[in-house]
Amino acid sequence: MKSCRFLALAAALACLTAGTASAQQPTQQGARPLPKEDKTFPKDSSWTLRQLDGKPVPAGMEATLRIDGQFRGAGFAGCNTWSATMWPVRGQRFAVGGIAVTKKACPQPVMQFESAFLHALFSAPTWDVIGDRMEVKSQAGTLTFGRGF
């Protein structure tokens, strides 16, 4: 009797599993794939810029990003500190509002680096977290961050 119940349960699970597997696979050629699910926005995290447009961050320059639990971003841009509200938007984008940047002057190469960093960060970018790396892409450039400061 117990083996009959076990066999019936196993058969029901096999049918259920087979139905689920076939529902996930398109059966018709040209069928549209399911939309990609958005990942969880990386709040309560800290990041250090590792590359700007695919090039390593120059020696002696640094840029950071910290996103707190209230969707407030802040960090260092190479010369000045910055802060802004950063909230997730559909399609793995984030919107930025209320930007504040200190007004310290630094040598021209540092200011150019800072300008490129901030422009890419605040130009309606998309983001993606892959392991310990986060990529932020916009029309103004690509930022590759490593986790932590």
Image: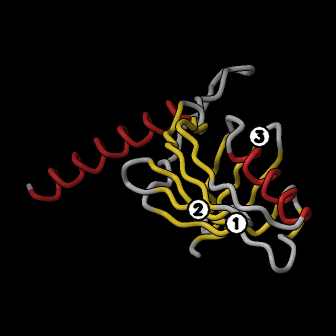
Give the CA separation, mark 2 to mark 1.
Answer: 7 Å
Amino acid bearing label 1: Ala
- Which numbered disc, 2 or 3, marks the residue that appears first in the sequence? 2
Residue assigned mark 1:
63
Give the CA separation, mark 2 to mark 3.
Answer: 19 Å
The reply to whether dot 2 and dot 3 touch (C-beta < 8 Å) is no
* Marker disc for residue 75: 2
Q: Is residue 51 left or right of residue 70?
A: right
Q: Residue at x 53, y 32 (%)?
A: 89
Q: What SS does tag 1 mark?
A: loop
Q: Residue at x 59, y 76 (%)?
A: 149
**Residue 136 image point, x, y percent:** 70, 50
Crowding at mark 1 (Cα within 10 Å: few <14, some 14-19, many 20+): many
Residue 145 in which image quadrant:
bottom right
Q: What SS does tag 2 mark?
A: strand
Report the residue that reaches farthest toward the bottom.
Answer: 60
Q: Is residue 66 above or below residue 120?
A: below
Q: Residue at x 47, y 48 (%)?
A: 40
Amino acid bearing label 2: Gly
Q: Residue at x 35, y 38 (%)?
A: 16
The reply to whether dot 2 and dot 1 touch (C-beta < 8 Å) is yes
Residue assigned mark 3:
138
